[in-house]
Amino acid sequence: MDTEKLWEILYKERNTASLQELPENFCEEVTEYMEKLREEKEEADERRRELVEDEIRNARMKVEDIIKRRIGKIVKLASSGMKTTPKGMLAEEEKIFEGVKKHVLEGKERIFALVTGEKGGESEEKREKEDEELAKLTLKEEKKIMGSVPATSQGEELHIVRILEDIPTFMGIDGRIYKVKKEDVIMLPKTNAEILCKRGVAVRFEAEKRI
């Protein structure tokens, strides 16, 4: 590492909107470079010492500018709702990203609760994650069941259930596509009804019939 390489890195960060991937072992190389300059300063004569001091100041300014610009980009990415950690971050930068993302999300929820008067509202990110997990689990169990159920669903018992929360669209074992939302009362094949009740997103009514 030297002042020219630091300038190249700073130039890229200044002139691109995206976060630049730093050279491998960036921190170690900068540390070694600064240590080398400090040692050189101690051993140099008065005239040379002033030049080395200038180089140290310039190096520090470039490093500080690089860090400042990168943190600005990281905060912007985190506050935009980006769910995955961008590539090319240092370990400490990843902590900043996750911390900012968490605080922005919590702040959003607090403001939403303050404005609407609602308490304990779930975040959009949490709701989306739960919907995805429910869809995967439902599909997985349905595939497992479908493997042992004949192609025809004649004679499948139907249950009436009340939906407790919005859930993703899914295909029943009868081949039908079900689009349901909170408070819907719907008749489902027994297998699908049991899966939803087991997941806590639906409750059964006593009414049921056979086809």
Image: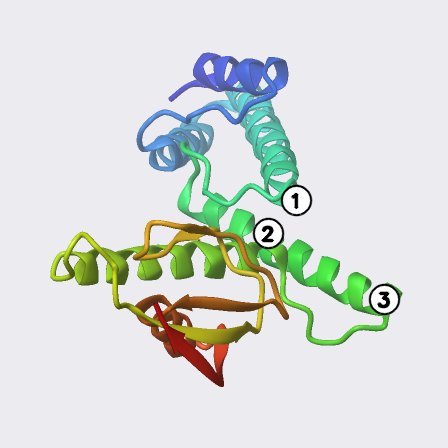
Give the structural element (helix, strand or loop) at label 3. Answer: helix
Q: Earlier in the sequence, mark 3 or mark 1?
A: 1
Where's residue 96, x and y in %? 55, 50
| Label 3: how many Cα within 10 Å (few below 14, some 14–19, many 20+) | few
Q: Earlier in the sequence, mark 1 or mark 2?
A: 1
**Quadrant of image for the N terminus:** top left
Can residue 59 be spotted in the picture? Answer: yes
In the rendered structure, the answer to whether residue 28 lies left or right of residue 47 reads: left
User: Can you tell which mark lies on residue 79?
Assistant: 1
Give the structural element (helix, strand or loop) at label 2. Answer: helix
Q: Identify which residue, 9 or 51, lies in the foreground.
A: 9
User: Can you tell which mark lies on residue 165?
Assistant: none
Where's residue 45, x and y in %? 48, 23
Q: Earlier in the sequence, mark 2 or mark 3?
A: 2
Amino acid beneath label 2: Lys
What residue appears at the point 62 percent right and 55 percent down from the top-left corner? 124
Q: Identify which residue, 124 or 24, lies in the foreground.
A: 124
Q: Residue furthest left?
A: 148
Where's residue 32, x and y in %? 35, 33
| Label 2: how many Cα within 10 Å (few below 14, some 14–19, many 20+) | many
Q: Residue furthest front?
A: 211
Residue that label 3 marks: 116
Q: Quadrant of residue 34?
A: top left
Task: For marks 3 and 1, give the CA distance.
Answer: 22 Å
Q: Identify which residue, 52 or 166, lies in the foreground.
A: 166
What residue appears at the point 39 percent right and 36 percent down from the top-left corner? 27
User: Can you tell which mark lies on residue 101?
Assistant: 2
Which is closer to the viewer, label 3 or label 1? 3
Asked whether the residues under the numbered discs 1 and 2 touch, taking CB atoms below 8 Å apart as contact, a structural biologist would say: yes
